[in-house]
Image (cartoon, grey):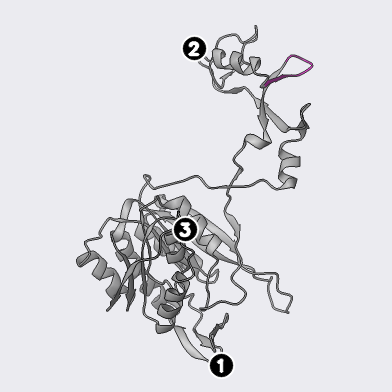
């Protein structure tokens, strides 16, 4: 498939993909960062984007005037089309403001099914603010993550341990200075006449439990020095810090917005890289129908995915083309090639 950059209304663009490009059920990942129902306009002045709505100066990059039930209806219409485009292994991430996000979730439960809701991700977007207000300071927004089905692509994301993590999680040190921890070699539940309910070094699993693996494997681990025996003769498996890939990514992410965005509400490339790598595969098609500055498209390109972007703003189109032009081409990253379509 040729990468596509569509300039026009996104309902027209999505219908074009369904009817003309025959992409129903072919999109593996959708990320959208739609307007947040702020009842304002976002502007660009002398090449610099405003980060707040209703800025008095500059050209309007996009208008965010729909609020309340009209906004929910506007989103719902587009999400129904996006669901048609999603493959059975597809996922959608919708980035939204905390003020309207909970209403959006109720609507997405209806469109995608509450059983396909996966996460309400908290995204830390900025440093703490110290101005007076009736309420706590707001430093977050939401990303609502749904899948089309239980067959969704999932490439387990990991993040590196910090020094504090290593000290806390791997408190022991061996003779070579390697940090490690130990875990039980038994698990809940009894087995009868199985390989995990036989004596290991003359010891049976505790009552109501079984060995996590067969006794032959435990014997091999012990010979390799991977079983630690306590002073009371209790065996535990040794886990070395330097052999772990890292810790699981949780549902609070700290990816702050660029300080000097080229386009209003521009998002972090690292945030999009996490989403793209986790919920799509090489050669998957990634779609963003509110693509703004083009960060989603850049992430898809550098991670070896196909992409489709839709936006009706002239400023957005310019920002996207400029951002794609910043991609460094090397052995692993191809030069962006795409077709521009005007609705």
Q: Of circles 3 and 2, which is in front?
A: 3
Between residue 311 and residue 213, name the one nearer to us.
311
Q: Secondary structure at mark 3?
A: loop
- Discs 3/1, front: 3
Question: Is there a contact, CB below 8 Å, between mark 3 and mark 1?
Answer: no
Q: Is residue 91 visible?
A: yes
| Residue under the image location 77 percent in, 32 percent down | 177
Q: Work out whether mark 2 precedes mark 1 in sequence or the reverse, and give the earlier one.
A: 1
Q: Which mark is residue 286?
A: none
Give the image location of residue 90, x and y in percent: 36, 53
Q: Quadrant of residue 294?
A: bottom left
- The local secondary structure at tag 1 comes to loop
Asked if one can make out residue 65 in the rendered structure from this viewpoint, the answer is no
Residue depicted at x 54% and y 58%: 121
Along the polypeptide, which appears first: circle 3 or circle 1? 1
Label 2 to label 1: alpha-carbon separation: 75 Å
Residue 146 among those drawn in magenta: no
231 falls in the magenta region? yes
Q: Which residues are magenta?
A: 227-233
Seen from the viewer's position, the closer of residues 282 and 250 is 282
Q: Residue furthest bottom?
A: 57
Residue 226 vs residue 287: left or right?
right
The numbered mark at residue 56 is: 1
Query: According to the image, label 3 marks what residue?
Result: 330
Q: Nearer the viewer, residue 109 or 53?
A: 53
For label 3, the crowd category at 10 Å Cα-Cα, with few meaning under 14, some 14 to 19 and many 20 or more, is few
Q: Earlier in the sequence, mark 3 or mark 2?
A: 2
In the figure, residue 219 lies in which quadrant?
top right
Residue 192 circle label: 2
- Out of 132 and 78, give the one closest to the viewer: 78
Badge 2 density bin: few <14, some 14–19, many ≥20, Cα 10 Å:
few
Which residue is painted at 33% across and 63% down in the image? 82
């Amino acid at each position: 498939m040729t990468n596509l950059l569509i300039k026009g209304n996104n309902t027209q663009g999505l219908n074009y993909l369904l009817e003309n490009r025959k992409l129903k059920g072919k999109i593996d990942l959708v990320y959208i960062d739609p307007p947040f129902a702020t009842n304002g306009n976002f502007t660009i002045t002398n090449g610099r984007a405003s980060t707040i709505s209703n800025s008095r100066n500059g050209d309007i990059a996009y208008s965010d005037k729909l609020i309340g039930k009209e906004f929910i209806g506007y989103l719902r219409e587009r999400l129904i089309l996006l669901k048609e485009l999603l493959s059975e292994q597809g996922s959608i991430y919708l980035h939204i403001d905390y003020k309207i996000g909970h209403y959006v979730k109720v609507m997405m439960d209806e469109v995608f099914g509450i059983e396909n809701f996966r996460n309400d991700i908290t995204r830390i977007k900025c440093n703490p603010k110290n101005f007076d207000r009736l309420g706590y300071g707001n430093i977050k927004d939401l990303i609502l993550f749904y899948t089309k089905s239980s067959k969704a692509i999932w490439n387990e994301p990991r993040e590196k341990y910090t020094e504090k993590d290593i000290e806390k999680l791997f408190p022991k040190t061996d003779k070579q200075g390697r940090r490690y921890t130990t875990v039980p070699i038994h698990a809940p539940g009894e087995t009868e006449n199985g390989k995990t309910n036989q004596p290991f070094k003359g010891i049976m699993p505790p009552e109501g439990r079984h060995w996590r693996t067969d006794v032959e494997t435990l014997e091999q681990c012990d010979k390799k020095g991977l079983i630690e025996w306590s002073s009371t003769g209790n065996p535990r498996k040794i886990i070395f810090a330097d052999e772990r890939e890292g810790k699981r990514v949780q549902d609070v992410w700290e990816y702050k917005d660029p300080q000097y965005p080229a386009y209003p509400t521009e998002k972090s490339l690292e945030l999009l890289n996490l989403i793209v790598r986790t919920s799509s595969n090489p050669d998957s098609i990634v779609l963003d129908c509110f693509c703004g500055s083009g960060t989603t498209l850049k992430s898809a390109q550098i991670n070896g995915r196909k992409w489709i972007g839709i936006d009706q703003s002239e400023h957005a189109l310019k920002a996207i083309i400029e951002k794609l032009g910043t991609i460094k081409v090397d052995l692993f990253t191809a030069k962006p090639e795409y077709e521009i379509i005007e609705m």
